[in-house]
Image (cartoon, rainbow, N blue to C red):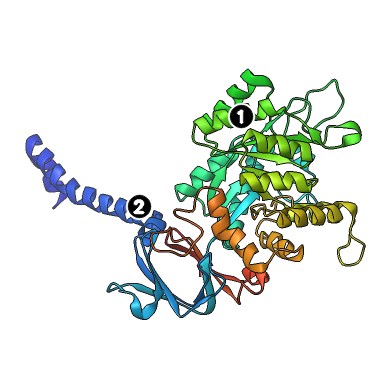
Amino acid sequence: MNLTLVRIMAPKNRLLIGILLFIPCFLSGWELLEAQERGARPAQAQARETILLRPARVFDGQSAQLHEGWAVLVEGDFISAVGPESGLTIPRGAQVVDLPGLTLLPGLIEGHAHLLLHPYDETPWTDQVLLESLGERTARGVVHAERSLMAGITTLRDLGTEGAGFADIGLKAAIEKGVIPGPRLIVTGKAIVATGSYNPKGAPEWDFPKGAEEADGYDDLVRVTRDQIGRGADWVKIYADYRWGPDGTAQPTFTEAELRTVVEVAESSGRWVVAHATTPEAIRRSVEAGIKTIEHGDGGDRATFRLMADRGVALCPTLGAGEAYAMYGGWRKGVDPDPARVVGKKESFRLALEEGVPMCFGGDVGVFDHGDNVWELELMVDYGMATIDALRSATSVNARIFGLDDRLGEVREGYLADLIAVEGDPTEDISALRQVRMVMKGGQIYKR
């Protein structure tokens, strides 16, 4: 309409004409917003698709034998059918993803990582805690989360921010909202340490920020445990021992009663407790207190591992961290003799295997490179674990340890579609897990 004509009309008519002119503009703007919103949510749109995956073979998370010729049907977030393709009912319009020559298996479940840390040969731990800003550390965490996912880690338990507050809880929320790519996170927040035991430390007249939250005694431990839970911790992590003994030796930090207090408070909220424990006494106290998993276990002996096996308490041996520390100290693997730390680690791992301790895949990633998680599995096999058992540890066993075995860790109908495809046969050569060619999480393909 001619705008000059509108101006000479009566005021009432000009208002009516103005409204009529505005409506198409409003509708166009609304359509533009809708289009922009659709463009901003590709993950949700793709997650509702029906996808047929056609790999060469499938490892289901349990069987020692690979299933040749199987296909997997994904509808939305979940696996709707698994088996020989000839026996599947495939909906019309399903997207077909051919994975020739590849092995399809459950997404890997990393049991011990620190997304807010990066390798200590780049920057020492103390400098990361004291000198790197929360913004920088969170930005690094975003990068580390994506690297982990691209390496086939679709679920990751982050065991402490090491001085970065509750940034892990923020990372988890950002991943769940689709803001950034990353694994499903199980987070612990700050972790709990006994006063005077943890680092950084310096001149005794100064109070330094710590890499975890200090708490002691019944009332303090109850308050801190509840506070961490209230802020979003999925598990509670406590340091049952640390290097605060004479000459820096590892010694227990909490009494069995204190550990039990934390367990009782956490379990009353439906959560579990994980303990850093390297000495036989700290491991024993932790197991007796009801702690669910033991991290490191370097100095564990046959008696403590037998106790763990009897109670069903799992060990995350963190073999990668042990070797990384040694290499940062100058050890040249394959050239120099194994240092005492590595020799001791091999022995304790062997004892734990012999006693039948449930074995968690968790390398303490962050001490070494994010995305290099498979190194831990390679070391588990190198130190004496059967390849198929290591593979199960990273899939169905970790799912059971973390209480996720009703939806993760297996290629099974009704389970979440967290799947990866790799070159080669990981049941024969664990290093095949380094050759990740496809990553799917919740029915969405992130790497193809």
Q: Residue at x 59, y 48 (%)?
A: 157
Q: Position of residue 70 (x, y in %)?
A: 44, 76
Depth order, front residue of 251/115:
251
Identify the residue at horizontal 15%, vertical 43% (top origin): 18
Residue farthest toward the top in the current orientation of the protein: 219
Classify mark 1: residues with Cα within 10 Å, few (<14), some (14-19) or many (20+). Answer: many
Q: Which residue matches tag 1?
A: 262
Which residue position holds label 2? 37
- Is residue 94 depicted above or below 306 in this figure? below
Compare residues 145 and 30 and report the one nearer the observer.
Answer: 145
The percent coordinates of residue 431 (x first, y second) are: 67, 70
Image coordinates for residue 350, horizontal then vertical, percent: 77, 57
Residue 434 lies in quadrant? bottom right
Tell whether 264 sits left or right of 241.
Answer: left
For mark 2, does the 10 Å Cα neighbourhood hold few (<14), some (14 to 19), or many (20 or more) residues? Answer: few
Q: CA distance from mark 1 to mark 2?
A: 44 Å
Q: Amino acid at mark 2?
A: Glu
Residue kind at label 1, given as amino acid type = Val
Instruction: Work out whether 273 lies above or below 204.
Output: below
